[in-house]
Each structure stands twice: as C-alpha cells, then as structure tokens.
C-alpha cells in the first residue's frame, strides 16, 4: 500500500483508487449487459408486432376478396330475372285495374 502526497494535505491510497476503478468497470459491464438484454427484448416485441400486422393484413385482404364475391352473388340473386322467378314461385297474380274504396268523413268503424 503506497501513499502519495501532493503537498496540499491530500493523501491518495493507490489501493482505494484501484478499487474505485474496478467498481466502475463492474457497474459499466452490468449496465452494458442490462441494456443489451433490454434491446433484445424490444427487438423481440417489435418482431412480434410486425408478424401480427402481417397476419392481420393477410386476413383483411382475404375478407375483402370474400366481400367482393358476396356482393357479386347478392347482385346476381337480386336481379330482375330472378325476381320474375320468385314471383312465379310465390303464385302472385298480375294486377289489372286498381279500385279504391272511398269512405265518407263522418264514418267510423266499430266492433
């Protein structure tokens, strides 16, 4: 153990300064590894998020295509030609002349 005096009433212990430097390096290495671990964690979370976005985008495209097909099918089923077939199937009759019943104003129907 050496003591060095610089003449200003300060005495430095070489062993204590070496311990402080050693402590500094240990703390520095701990912080470096902690930050590296945090960086890897963040990178993993970003990758998961990107994968989710990609899957949702793929599902959105699939649903959009299905929606287009359903719109086409709906328009085909509701076309005028199909309405004629539906009218025949439900046994509707074609109307001729329409007569309206006129009710005088003072008349009320009771049961």
Image (cartoon, rainbow, N blue to C red):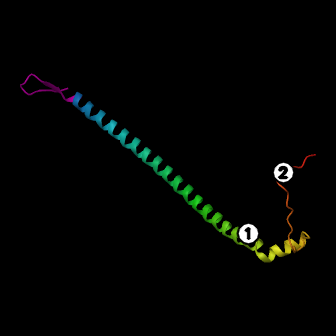
Reading the image, the residue beneath label 2 is 106
> What residue sits right under mark 1 in the picture?
74
Closer mark to the observer between disc 2 and disc 1: 2
Please state the extent of the stretch shown in magenta in the rendering: 1-15
Instruction: Tell me which residue sits at (8%, 28%) in the image.
Output: 6
Determine the residue positioned at 85% across, 61% down. Answer: 102
Residue 98 coordinates in the image, percent (x, y): 85, 70
- Of residues 92 and 31, which is closer to you in this image? 92
Which residue lies at the image location 46% right of the left edge and 48% below the top edge?
42
Q: Nearer the viewer, residue 96 or 7?
A: 96
Residue sitting at the far top: 9
Residue 108 at x, y percent in the picture: 87, 49
Q: Residue at x 20, y 26 (%)?
A: 1
Q: Quadrant of residue 103?
A: bottom right
Circle 1: element type: helix
Position of 17 compared to 55: left or right?
left
Task: Give coordinates of residue 25: x percent, y percent.
Answer: 30, 38
Is residue 5 magenta-colored?
A: yes
Left or right of 49? Residue 37 is left
Instruction: Measure the alpha-carbon separation of dots 2 and 1.
Output: 49 Å
Residue 97, compared with residue 24, is above or below; it is below
Residue 34, numbered circle:
none
Answer left or right for 59 relative to 106. left
């Amino acid at each position: 153990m050496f003591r060095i005096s610089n003449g200003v009433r300060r005495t430095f212990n070489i062993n204590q300064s070496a311990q402080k430097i050693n402590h500094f390096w240990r703390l520095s290495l701990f912080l470096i590894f902690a930050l590296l671990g945090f960086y890897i964690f963040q990178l993993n979370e970003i990758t998961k998020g990107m994968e989710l976005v990609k899957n949702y985008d793929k599902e959105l495209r699939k649903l959009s295509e299905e929606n287009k097909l359903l719109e086409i099918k709906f328009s085909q089923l509701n076309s005028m030609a199909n309405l004629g077939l539906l009218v025949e199937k439900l046994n509707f009759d074609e109307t001729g002349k329409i007569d309206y019943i006129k009710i005088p104003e003072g008349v009320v129907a009771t049961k």
